[in-house]
Amino acid sequence: MSNISFSVTGVDKLSKALLSRASAGDIKSVVKRNTTQMQQQAMSNASSVFTKGYSTGDTKKSIGVSFKDSGMSGVTGLGMEYNQYTELGTRFMAAEPLLKPVFNKQKTVFKSDLEKLLK
C-alpha cells in the first residue's frame, strides 16, 4: 500500500476509557465496520474522482483493508505505487484525493460510534 497515512491523536486516553466502559469485542466490531465502510466508500468514489482519460480501474481494485492490534486498529489503503501522486498531486499535476475526503467523512461516523459505546 502507499506511504500516505492519517493519524488520530489522543488514542491512549481514548483506549483506556473505551476498555473501561465497553468490551473489546464491541470496540473491534466498531473498528471493523468503520474500516470496511471506508473501503466501500472509497471504492464507490474512485470512478468519480478519476475522471480523466487515464482511469483504468486499477486504483479501485487496489483499495484494501487490513487489521492490526488484534482487530483494534484498521487500515484502508491504496495499493498502487503511484497513488501517492494522485492523492497528493505533484508540482505538475493537481491532487485528486480519494482517501482523504472519505477519511474525513468516516472519522465523524467512527467518533459517533465510539461515543455510543461510552454511554
Image: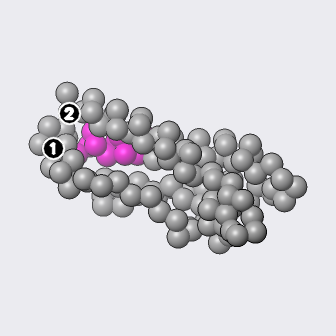
The amino acid type of the residue labelled 1 equals Ala
Report the residue marked by disc 1. 17
Q: Residue at x 34, y 33 (%)?
A: 113
The amino acid type of the residue labelled 2 equals Leu
Is 44 colored magenta in this rendering?
no
Q: Quadrant of the N terminus?
A: bottom right
Give the side of residue 72 with respect to residue 94, left or right: left
Q: What kind of element bears circle 2?
A: helix
Report the residue marked by disc 2. 118
Residue 97 x %, y %: 63, 53
Q: Residue furthest left?
A: 20
Is 31 colored magenta in this rendering?
yes
* Few, some or many residues within 10 Å of mark 1 (<14, 14–19, 20+): few
Residues at marks 1 and 2 touching, judged by CB atoms closer than 8 Å: yes
Q: Quadrant of the C terminus?
A: top left
Q: What kind of element bears circle 1?
A: helix
Between residues 42 and 90, which one lies in front from this camera angle?
Answer: 90
N-terminal label among 1 and 2: 1
Magenta-tinted stretch: 24-33
Q: Residue furthest right?
A: 53
Residue 8 x %, y %: 35, 54
Q: Is residue 36 visible?
A: no
Identify the disc placed on residue 60.
none
